[in-house]
Image (cartoon, helix red, strand yellow):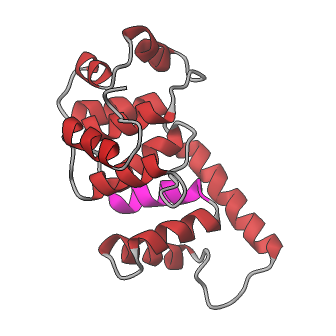
């Protein structure tokens, strides 16, 4: 499961984003090793022989084409995660403070979007792991940038540490001088 998920995420990222993830996780962490292994298997980045710009463009275009064919929509993945967590739609949209109308607009209209904070809250409510959160954010059109965004940093830490209690997370936000995520 991780390999497929990682491969899909990698197809949507540029080299800088991939390197930032590896640096944050550390090359020697289990996920860092898995990520580096996939990159080496695919022959992308992290190779000993430098590639020409044309070779890189060809590889990326092939990867993007393949990803488009396999890509699921944001709401399809969200519903998969909701079902896996054995929650109802109402439990999720109420827990994140989203109204029912927006939830169903996301479901019925592929062009409808929600804000990044809502997607981060979904990841917490659904007890997603780091890579699943990253994947869902990418499907929603957002990037996770923990090095630059304090909200991303706090949520990333909580998810990697398996802290999913909304009150505890809001307390962390408050203690660090940030706007709470759930009690806005």
- Quadrant of the rendering where the N terminus is positioned: bottom left
Q: Position of residue 8 (x, y in %)?
A: 49, 54
Q: Is residue 57 above or below residue 151?
A: below
- Residue closest to the eye, 180 or 137: 180
Range drawn in magenta: 1-13
- Residue closest to the eye, 21 or 155: 155
Q: Position of residue 89 (x, y in %)?
A: 28, 19
- Does residue 52 appear left or right of residue 120 in this picture? right
- Residue closest to the eye, 126 or 34: 126
Q: Is residue 106 visible?
A: yes
Per the image, is 147 magenta? no
Residue found at x 51% / y 40%: 139
Q: Position of residue 46 (x, y in %)?
A: 58, 81
Residue found at x 32% / y 26%: 96
Q: Main secondary structure of the magenta part?
A: helix
- Quadrant of res 45: bottom right
- Quadrant of res 182: top left
Q: Position of residue 136 (x, y in %)?
A: 44, 42
- Quadrant of res 123: top left
Q: Is residue 73 visible?
A: no
Residue at the bottom extreme?
A: 48
- Quadrant of the rendering where the C terminus is positioned: top left
Residue found at x 55% / y 71%: 19
């Amino acid at each position: 499961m991780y390999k497929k998920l990682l491969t899909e995420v990698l197809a949507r990222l540029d080299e800088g984003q991939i390197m930032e993830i590896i640096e944050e996780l550390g090359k020697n962490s289990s996920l860092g090793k898995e990520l580096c292994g996939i990159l080496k298997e695919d022959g992308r980045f992290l190779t000993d022989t430098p590639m020409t710009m044309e070779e890189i463009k060809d590889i990326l275009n092939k990867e993007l084409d393949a990803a488009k064919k396999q890509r699921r929509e944001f709401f399809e993945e969200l519903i998969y995660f909701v079902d896996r967590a054995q929650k109802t739609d109402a439990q999720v949209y109420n827990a994140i403070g989203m109204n029912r109308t927006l939830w169903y607009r996301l479901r019925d209209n592929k062009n409808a979007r929600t804000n990044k904070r809502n997607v981060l809250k979904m990841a917490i409510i659904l007890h997603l792991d780091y890579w699943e959160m990253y994947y869902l954010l990418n499907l929603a059109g957002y990037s996770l940038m923990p090095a630059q965004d304090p909200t991303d940093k706090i949520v990333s830490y909580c998810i990697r540490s398996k802290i999913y209690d909304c009150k505890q997370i809001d307390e962390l936000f408050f203690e660090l001088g940030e706007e709470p995520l759930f009690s806005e």
